[in-house]
Image (cartoon, rainbow, N blue to C red):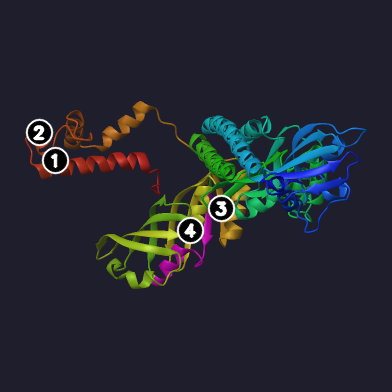
Amino acid sequence: MDEWLRRAPVGLIKVATDGTVVDVNEAAQSLLQTADDPAGAPLSETFPRSVEDTLLVAFDGDSVTETAFEEYYPDPERWLSVSVVPTDDGAAVYVQNITARRRGQQSVERLQKERERTAVIDRVQSEILGELVSASSRAEIAETLCRGLGETELYEFAWVGARDIGGDELTVQAVAGDTGQIATAIRDAVADDTATTIEEHAVADGRLRTAQPLAASERVPEAVRIAGFAAGVQSALAIPLVYGSSVHGVVGVYAGGTEAFSDRERTSFETLGEVAGFGVTAARNRNLLLSDSVAEITFEVGDSSVLAELSRLFDSELTLGGLVPSGDDGLLCFVSVRDYDVQTTEAVISRVDGIDEARVIDASDRGGTLELGITGSTPLLAVSSLGGTVRRGSFDRGTGEIVVDLPPDGDVRRIVETVRNEYDAEFVAKTERERTVSTAREFRDQLDDRLTERQRTALRTAYLADYFESPRGSTAAEVASALDISDSTLLYHLRAGQRKLLDAYLVEEGVRE
């Protein structure tokens, strides 16, 4: 071989007609990763093997076939570009390492496919979210999720499991898509106490779970892996339906590819799970608001309750005036304290686990009102997340009583069991209470009866003068001047009137929410 060919940057292998290596240059020897001179050895023993073995096929016959191709060679894990050019006494085989270029192409193709999938996923999720907003029941939410995910070209099938209130057990609510035997295998695994699906793992800790590839995941029951392999399902994703500290259920999504769920897709699905979890809670709250009757449940709590413990330390009586959810696991509680100097509460409150902050709203010789920031596990927050409303609460020297309204459906018993078992609360009584229905005119008449003539005049004048707009169309001084009263008198009437309006809107025979 000429010296300039021996030092050429392109690999060159001279091969005889019978497939015997005659000579190689330095570049080819480097690509073949051999320290010995391969001259005289068969090409099949010198050149690495690929799945197609296209190079050896070119020498399979009486003459050499001219060809050019690109193939992946598992050993030495490279993509090679190979050209075979027949000569009078055999052939010249030109070889180049194109691994970097092919991997770059694969990355571009993978990103392009991911973009296409993401666009489809975003569209599907947008449609699902739009339907979730108007969903009126848990069953309707489950059908929406299944139909939106299981009936697309992206996934093989989807199923929704509802979590029983008070436990981690799942009940299959809806299934959609071409399930084959895998849906039956999952249903059996969910009912089997000795097996745990990734959906059950997701419900247990409220976190997204994946199995990619499905057949190699030890977290997936064997029967599900076998059924998935037979159905061509190679990836699974479990999306918990989370709202605050409550996990209402889970969506299981199954796909054909071994890496079907990218990081970006998982982030999108987390958001979908949170919205669906909110939808379940909202549907329960809506049912409570629209019910003609409610189930009124009374619980007795001990000093494991934050407010009961506080009443013990105060040696006083506390009344819950209202509560407002704060974040995922927090509450702002407004508590009236009787016969206790609330100005001296800081040292006492610091001894109570679960109270992060406290503020005195008003104080008098007979007690006062406190704003308490409570975090962590509490029956007050649990009732709200489970679709109930705290109606009233009172606590006296280490014990307490809370009364909650729940929608009169099949969840009442399980909600009661949850509060009783998880929060050391004793069930006392249950009563059915019919709600009174007021028309808009009756509601306005009731408000009108509460307001004095001066309050009504001040509110109407300020409203028409755009005092409540932002930016204001009139100042307090201008409104007061129009009424021929002082600024302080106007503000007094406005505050008193606004308070009565807010009482009518926020208060219903007890706790303000």
Mark 2 vs 3, N-terminal side: 3
Say the numbered circle drawn on residue 483: 2
Marks 1 and 3, how far apart at CA? 47 Å
Residue that badge 3 annotates = 429
Place of residue 433 in the rendered image (x, y in percent of width and height, measured from the top left): 51, 41
Marks 2 and 1, how far apart at CA? 9 Å
Mark 3 vs 4, N-terminal side: 4
Dot 1 and dot 3 residues touching (CB under 8 Å): no
The residue at 88%/50% (across/down) is 40
**Count the marks: how many?**
4
Say the numbered circle drawn on residue 401: 4
Please tell me how crowded label 2 is: few (under 14), some (14-19), or many (20+) other residues with Cα within 10 Å: some
Residue that badge 1 annotates = 490
Residue at disc 4, secondary structure: strand
Residue span colored magenta: 297-313
Tell me the amino acid under the disc marked 4. Answer: Glu
Q: Name the side, left or right, on which 131 lies relative to 71.
A: left
Marks 3 and 4, how far apart at CA? 11 Å
Residue at disc 1, secondary structure: helix
